[in-house]
Amino acid sequence: MPSHPGLHATASEIVPTEAARRPRTSRGAGQLPEGERPTEADAPRPAVQPAAATLDRCRSLVEPALRKAVRGLHPGPRRIASHAFGWCETDGTPSARGGGKGVRPALVVLGAEAVGAPADVAVPGAVAIELIHTFSLMHDDIMDGDGSRRHRDSAWKAFGTGPALLAGDALFALGVRTLAEVGGDRGGEAVRHLTVMLGELVHGQADDELFESRPWTGPQAVGIAEYRAMADRKTGALLGCAAAIGPVLAGAPRRLTYALAQAGREWGLAFQAVDDVLGIWGDPAVTGKPVHSDLRRAKKTLPVLGALAMDPSLGPRLDQLIGADTPPDDARLRQAADLIERAGGRAYALRDARSRVAAARDQLRTVPLAAPCVDELVALSELFVDRRV
């Protein structure tokens, strides 16, 4: 684990800020005693909310502000963005489908609450993270040529590549602006976290794309260490930023912010590992994407790299079945998927995801955070491994 100045905070540094001592009004749980930092010993300790209830609570807090922000966009990008969020159909009529689960905004809210701050402190950060997340999905779909997202046409498929790129850019700019408007030292620090994360996300996405052209075997093959560095940037950085921005906006000590950021990165690696499994074996009726989609594009994902590490003889067979020189048909893709599973690649990726969630839980319990919020974060993190979409 990299060193960080916040890891060596003194006891006096862990006393919560003035914001952290205000009541957590959105939770209706009253107020922490004046001058007392949140700890695992906080009592009484309420029952852990189911993850669905946590997501609903956070969504009801964040979505009105998110919709208000998007309404300020130019009508063209606004309609495309509203479609991407699941709020409207292609023609602009309201949609009853809904969008994503809102996990990342929930991490922002829970991160603020975990350091004792009221949930509304986190709203600008939650809005910014969801705007940036949706921007990244819109551009990712264009890069990957994915024509569907959440069982509907992706933005570029529905509106064209140029308009979708412009709408994604609009969300990017709006996300940065939303945090910048917080102002003060906390707003500036939050913008710094966001921009550092964006640089990592672009770096990871570029690596992921370049990996597709590299062979399965030989000195130019992608190794597991390279994959992890890519996944940490591509997926871990965004979740780490989501978990950290709430504490940053609350003015929490760096030690607490760092612990939440590190937990978020572990959740990102867990999420990516399961996403890799779904990219090979996911049910199209559930995921909305073709089966074996990652193999078709020769993506260097964790199940394949894990299988190769355990059975190097698999490499030449994968080159024959799904190598760059021979576009694979469905039969070859099925055979490759079966080989990877028999070599243990699927189980390897799922074990890795579980270990990441456990590491994040342990990370959160090394610092004094509000115990009920830690419990909610742990419950929410189960969604990263126990998911079908």
Image (tube, rainbow, N blue to C red):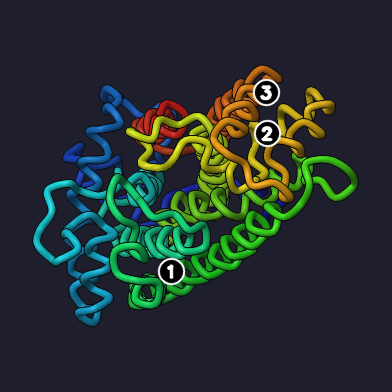
Q: On screen, 220 above or below 371?
A: below
Q: On screen, 50 above or below 155?
A: above
| Residue 279 placement (x, y as % from top left) | 51, 38
N-terminal label among 3 and 1:
1
Front label number (3 vs 1): 3
| Residue 55 placement (x, y as % from top left) | 27, 40
N-terminal label among 2 and 1:
1
Nearer to me, 79 or 49? 79
- From the image, which quarter does the C terminus lie in? top left
Residue at image coords 39%, 55%: 147
Q: Amino acid at mark 2?
A: Val
Label 2 to label 3, Cα distance in Å? 10 Å
Residue at image coords 57%, 36%: 273
Q: Which mark is residue 186?
A: 1
Front label number (2 vs 3): 3
The secondary structure type at the circle numbered 3 is helix
Q: Residue furthest right?
A: 219
- From the image, which quarter does the N terminus lie in? top right
The residue carrying pointer 2 sits among few (fewer than 14), some (14 to 19) or many (20 or more) residues within 10 Å by Cα, namely: many
Q: Amino acid at mark 3?
A: Leu
Residue position marked by numbered label 3 in the rendering:
339
The residue carrying pointer 1 sits among few (fewer than 14), some (14 to 19) or many (20 or more) residues within 10 Å by Cα, namely: some
Residue position marked by numbered label 2 in the rendering:
304
Q: Quadrant of residue 276?
A: top right
The secondary structure type at the circle numbered 2 is helix
Residue at image coords 22%, 64%: 82
- Mark yes or no: residue 12 visible: no
| Residue 68 placement (x, y as % from top left) | 18, 69
Q: Residue furthest top?
A: 342
Label 2 to label 1, Cα distance in Å? 42 Å
* Contact flag, marks 2 and 3 (Cβ < 8 Å): no
